[in-house]
């Protein structure tokens, strides 16, 4: 577990690069996936997702070329569905999840997406807290969605993400998390 003081955390976050996930990242992604989830995706699921072109957006947060976390999104017309988000257990609680979520939202803005949804285990309170911060609200239950233990999934939605109010919300989250403005500019440049 890495414990960094606040100023160092800001430096750490600004040192991260967020780039599109590529096949070359999959060894590291799979290592995190196996440690982060009780029922990890297989490598072939990631490969299939990466082959789906513009209907998907998979990103990784790199620290000195090491993958620290990743997130995937599926786009359906003007809605986005977050399919996967995980941070290396050794790097959790350092705002990498927040950084990934803010990037997903910024990408959604570029595509004129109006609403974002996801499923989360009803027992996964730490992820739910992260999503609530981003304005996601519970909208229903999928019974027995997680087959290995028959756990229910909570369906969450964030609506009106193109509103001025939501833009302010994201700017505040980024400021509070210490995500530096110059780092956001650098990432936009990297993504074109
Ligand atoms: C959920 C996950 C992606 C969060 O990543 P992270 O980088 O640790 O998250 P952040 O540091 O940005 O934390 C953001 C907020 O989430 C909540 N949170 C994150 N970890 C938490 C924990 N261990 N306990 C309580 N709240 C937690 C807090 O509200 C936190 O804000 P704070 O630190 O200011 O209190 C990470 O815990 C993870 O990979 N979990 C395993 C995979 C998973 O469950 N993915 C979600 C599937 S739906």
Image (tube, helix red, strand yellow):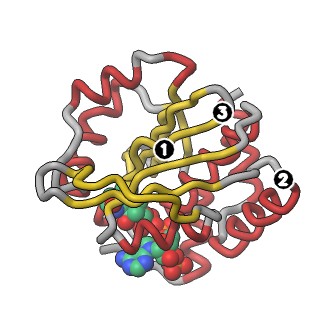
Query: For the point 55% across and 45% down, which residue is it?
Result: 17
- Disc assigned to residue 190: 3
Query: For the point 71% across and 27% down, which residue is it?
Result: 192
Query: For the point 48% across and 44% down, which residue is it?
Result: 82
Image: 115 above or below 92: above
Distance between the Cα atoms at labels 3 and 2? Answer: 26 Å
Image: 8 above or below 189: below
Q: Nearer the viewer, residue 102 or 140?
A: 140
Q: Is residue 47 left or right of residue 3?
A: left
* Residue 161 x/y as whole percent: 74, 51
- Would you say the beta carbon of the disc 1 residue lies within 8 angstroms of ligand 1? yes
Query: For the point 55% across and 62% down, which residue is it?
Result: 98
* Residue 73 x/y as whole percent: 50, 37
Instruction: Find disc 1 in the rendering and name its residue.
Output: 82
Q: Is residue 165 left or right of residue 175?
A: right
User: Please, what secondary structure does the residue beneath circle 3 have?
Assistant: helix
- Would you say the beta carbon of the disc 2 residue lies within 8 angstroms of ligand 1? no
Distance between the Cα atoms at labels 3 and 1? Answer: 22 Å
User: Please, what secondary structure does the residue beneath circle 2 have?
Assistant: loop
Q: Is residue 102 left or right of residue 143?
A: right
Distance between the Cα atoms at labels 2 and 1? Answer: 20 Å
What is the count of numbered marks?
Answer: 3
Instruction: Find disc 2 in the rendering and name its residue.
Output: 163
Query: First in sequence: mark 3 or mark 1?
Result: 1
């Amino acid at each position: 577990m890495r414990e960094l003081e606040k100023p160092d955390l800001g430096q750490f976050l600004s040192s991260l690069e967020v780039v599109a996930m590529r096949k070359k990242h999959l060894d590291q992604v799979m290592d995190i996936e196996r440690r982060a989830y009780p029922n990890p995706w297989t490598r072939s699921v990631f490969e299939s997702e990466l082959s789906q072109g513009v209907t998907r957006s998979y990103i990784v947060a790199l620290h000195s070329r090491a993958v620290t976390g990743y997130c995937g999104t599926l786009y359906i017309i003007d809605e986005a569905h977050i399919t996967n988000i995980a941070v290396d257990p050794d790097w959790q609680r350092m705002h990498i999840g927040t950084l990934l979520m803010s990037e997903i939202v910024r990408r959604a803005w570029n595509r004129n997406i109006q609403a974002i949804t996801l499923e989360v285990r009803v027992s996964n309170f730490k992820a739910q807290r992260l999503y609530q911060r981003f304005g996601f609200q519970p909208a229903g239950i999928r019974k027995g969605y997680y087959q290995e233990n028959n756990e229910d999934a909570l369906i969450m939605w964030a609506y009106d993400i193109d509103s001025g109010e939501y833009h302010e919300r994201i700017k505040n989250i980024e400021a509070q998390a210490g995500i530096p403005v110059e780092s956001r500019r650098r990432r936009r440049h990297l993504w074109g």
